């Protein structure tokens, strides 16, 4: 494995890599101090972001508001998709 591929693979979570890819990455990181430093920095950044994200207070009503908005958007999208069919069906029914 070369450094370029190693840096690309560092963007993925370990669970997203195959066992072979994870082993190859680990092997490269043990022999390449530059990539090993990049891996440590990446992990440190991930941990800092995770800590910052969990430190932000989330309003209790946020989940409900997000789900309400998502359901409204989904209903509107379904209606837009179905409306030509509904119009065609109404035409057929009214014609008879």
Image (cartoon, grey):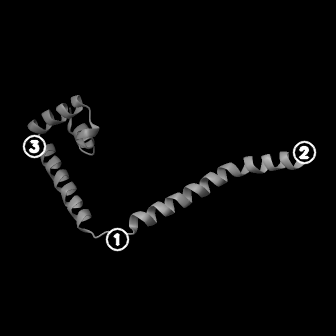
Q: What quarter of the picture does the N terminus occupy? A: top left
Mark 3 falls on what kind of element?
A: helix
Q: Nearer the viewer, residue 31 or 12?
A: 12
Residue at left offset 73%, top offset 46%: 85
Q: CA distance from mark 3 to mark 2?
A: 79 Å
* Residue at the spot of label 2: 96
Residue 16, quarter of the rendered image: top left
Q: CA distance from mark 1 to mark 2?
A: 55 Å
Nearer to us of marks 3 and 2 is 2
Q: Which mark is residue 33?
A: 3
Nearer-N-terminus badge (1/3): 3
* Residue at the spot of label 1: 59
Q: Residues within 10 Å of mark 1 (few under 14, many from 20)?
A: few
Q: Residues within 10 Å of mark 3 (few under 14, many from 20)?
A: few
| 85 sits to left or right of 20 | right
Mark 1 falls on what kind of element?
A: loop
| 81 sits to left or right of 53 | right
Residue 36, quarter of the rendered image: top left
Mark 2 falls on what kind of element?
A: loop
How far across and down, in percent of the image, does residue 78 sit? Answer: 61, 51
Nearer-N-terminus badge (3/2): 3
In the rendered image, the residue lying farthest to the top is: 20
Q: CA distance from mark 1 to mark 3?
A: 44 Å
Residue at left offset 9%, top offset 36%: 31
Q: Nearer the viewer, residue 42 or 13?
A: 13
How far across and down, in percent of the image, does residue 81 sit? Answer: 65, 49
């Amino acid at each position: 494995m070369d450094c370029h591929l190693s840096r690309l693979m560092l963007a993925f979570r370990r669970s997203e890599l195959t066992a072979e890819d994870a082993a190859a990455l680990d092997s490269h990181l043990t022999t390449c101090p530059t990539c090993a430093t990049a891996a440590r920095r990446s992990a440190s950044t991930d941990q800092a972001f995770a800590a910052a994200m969990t430190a932000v207070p989330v309003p209790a009503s946020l989940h409900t508001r997000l789900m309400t908005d998502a359901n409204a958007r989904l209903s509107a999208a379904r209606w837009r998709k179905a409306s030509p069919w509904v119009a065609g069906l109404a035409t057929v029914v009214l014609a008879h």
